[in-house]
Image: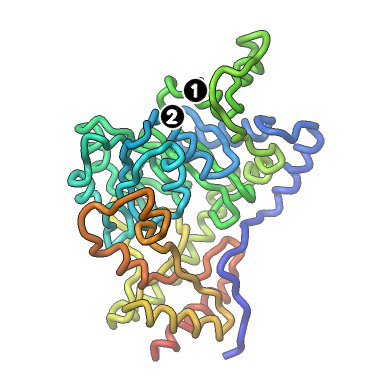
Amino acid sequence: MERKKIEFNRAPFLGTETKYMEQAIANGKLCGDGPFTKKCSEQMQEKFGARHVLLTTSCTHALEMAAFLCDLKPGDEVIMPAYTFVSTADAFVLQGAKLVFVDIRPDTMNIDETKIEAAITDRTRVIVPVHYAGVACEMDTIMDIARRYHLKVVEDAAQGVNAYYKGKALGTIGDFGCYSFHETKNYTMGEGGALLFHDPAYLERAEILREKGTNRSKFFRGQIDKYTWVSYGSSYLPSDMNAAYLYAQLLDMEKINDRRMEIFNYYHEHLAVLEEKGLIHRPVLPEGCVHNAHMYYLKVKDLKTRSDLISYMKEKGVQCVFHYIPLHTAPAGLKYGRFSGEDVYTTKESECLMRLPMFYGLDMEDVKYVTQCLLEYTGY
């Protein structure tokens, strides 16, 4: 078979982004909260049903804002999975919180909702479900636990833009939702994110936090005649140039989604034979979850098998990668957190998982080549 060079990821580009970026230049306002920043927020409010959407410079910053708005005090506890990106944890560490990691489900790689309640103490304040691969956590159970124990829920929906749980957009179910528009995500602005919430009681504080601690947003709306420093804040405003790039993709979300679904479905259908033979596990899509084809992963027998397979695919010119090292095993995880209960699946399943190339511009002939390489490796 002819050797190719197939990247794991490439940022999506539709071709219309340049037009809107040129408009941003012509507007003469490239800093934050320009016309395209507002257009992006309005587009997401309408599409996802979120009352408030604030575009940010990253999902990390959206998480930091959510953590701040949760009014955490040093020593308060936050429950989350250890199988996630460091930003999920960092945002709450910044507020002095103690991280409490619980095990994941082996089917979806999401937090095991049945382990959350046992991890709750009198210091618990927040639950952070992470929607891995754009597949929803079991949010009905999580929200029920949160209501009974009076806890906040911050959805890390970095991978969940345009994915749904029982008809609700991920990121709009909890108290706060956080999106990523990094270049590795389905929709991008290079670096960027968004904070979503419904309760208007958070709006003024969120705006002040995002505007370096000033009430500048009220000034620009004409609600006050001058603005001043009123509280702690930082600069979470993305450039309007970046927002212009994103706006083009938000207008054409389904075009990107349809293409990614085509790739996902090809992998899923043609690798089924390997699962039937007990050689791999494919992604599981629970009832009520509408995913967004954020990634396609497979799980093999063990760490050695995965390492061998990644090396084989590299020899064939295909870049396949593993994912997170569980946070509770990292130096910072040991310092800032603890694991509640037993690590039955988090480490074991993380060592088996390998991600395949998946991006909007991936040619279907390349998708077929990747699939054929996997079949040949296993003898099919």
- In the image, what residue type sits under mark 1? Arg
- In the image, what residue type sits under mark 2? Leu
Q: Is residue 219 left or right of residue 254?
A: right
Q: Are marks 2 and 1 in contact (CB under 8 Å)?
A: yes
What separation in Å lies between label 2 and label 1 (alpha carbons)?
Answer: 8 Å
Q: Residue at x 55, y 23 (%)?
A: 208
x then y, percent, for residue 199: 40, 24
User: Between disc 2 and disc 1, whose residue precedes?
Assistant: 2
* Residue 119 or residue 98, whichever sits in front: 98
> Up-down: is 47 above or below 275?
above
Give the residue pinned by disc 1: 205
Give the residue pinned by disc 2: 69
Q: Quadrant of the N terminus?
A: bottom right
Q: Residues within 10 Å of mark 2 (few under 14, many from 20)?
A: some
Q: Residue at x 77, y 38 (%)?
A: 23
> What colour scheme governs how the chains and residues are painted in the rendered image of this protein?
rainbow
How many marks are shown on the rendered structure?
2
Secondary structure, mark 2, is helix
x then y, percent, for residue 176: 41, 35
x then y, percent, for residue 306: 40, 78
Q: Quadrant of residue 110?
A: bottom left
* Residue 350 or residue 16, whichever sits in front: 350
Q: Quadrant of the C terminus?
A: bottom left
Secondary structure, mark 1, is helix
